[in-house]
């Protein structure tokens, strides 16, 4: 009766037919729903393992900023180079 009382009001009318039918379907076919959720979990786990195996980086990449000022071009570098600062001139005389 606890199951039925959730969906029936004082007059005996059905208050939530969608929830009642969903609960009834799951109660009548528990193996089918357990199998579905088990397969869904396996699929999600396999997808996560494959993503980690392929070493896919899902973070957003940003291009270095380039600014030009009076013939000199300056570009920001995220990783420092071993040779220090490099300055290149566009004009070759």
Image: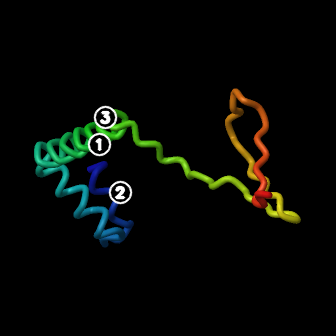
Question: Outermost residue toward the top?
Answer: 82
Label 3: how many residues lie within 10 Å, few (<14), some (14-19) or many (20+)?
few
Q: Which residue is disc 1 drawn over? A: 47
Q: Which residue is disc 2 drawn over? A: 6
Q: Nearer the viewer, residue 46 or 16?
A: 46
SS at mark 3 in the image: helix
Q: Which residue is disc 3 drawn over? A: 49
Depth check, mark 3 against mark 2: the one in front is 3
Q: Tags 3 and 2 in contact by the CB under 8 Å rule?
A: no
Q: How is the image coloured?
A: rainbow
Measured along the vertical axis of the image, is residue 62 above or below residue 45?
below
- In the displayed structure, does residue 48 sit left or right of residue 71? left
Residue at the location (22% across, 38% down)? 42
Picture quadrant where residue 7 is located: bottom left
Q: Which mark is residue 26?
A: none
Tell me the quadrant of the picture where the C terminus can be found. bottom right
Q: Tags 3 and 1 in contact by the CB under 8 Å rule?
A: yes
- In the displayed structure, does residue 25 sit left or right of residue 14? left
Sequence-first tag of 1 and 2: 2
Q: Tags 1 and 2 in contact by the CB under 8 Å rule?
A: no
Cα separation between marks 1 and 2:
38 Å
């Amino acid at each position: 009766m606890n199951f039925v009382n959730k969906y029936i009001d004082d007059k005996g009318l059905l208050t939530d037919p969608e929830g009642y039918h969903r609960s009834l379907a799951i109660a009548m076919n528990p193996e089918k729903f357990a199998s579905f959720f088990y397969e869904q979990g396996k699929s999600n786990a396999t997808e996560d393992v494959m993503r980690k195996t392929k070493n896919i980086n899902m973070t957003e990449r940003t291009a270095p900023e380039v600014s030009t000022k009076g013939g000199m071009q300056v570009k920001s570098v995220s990783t420092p180079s071993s040779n220090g600062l490099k300055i290149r001139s566009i004009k070759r005389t």
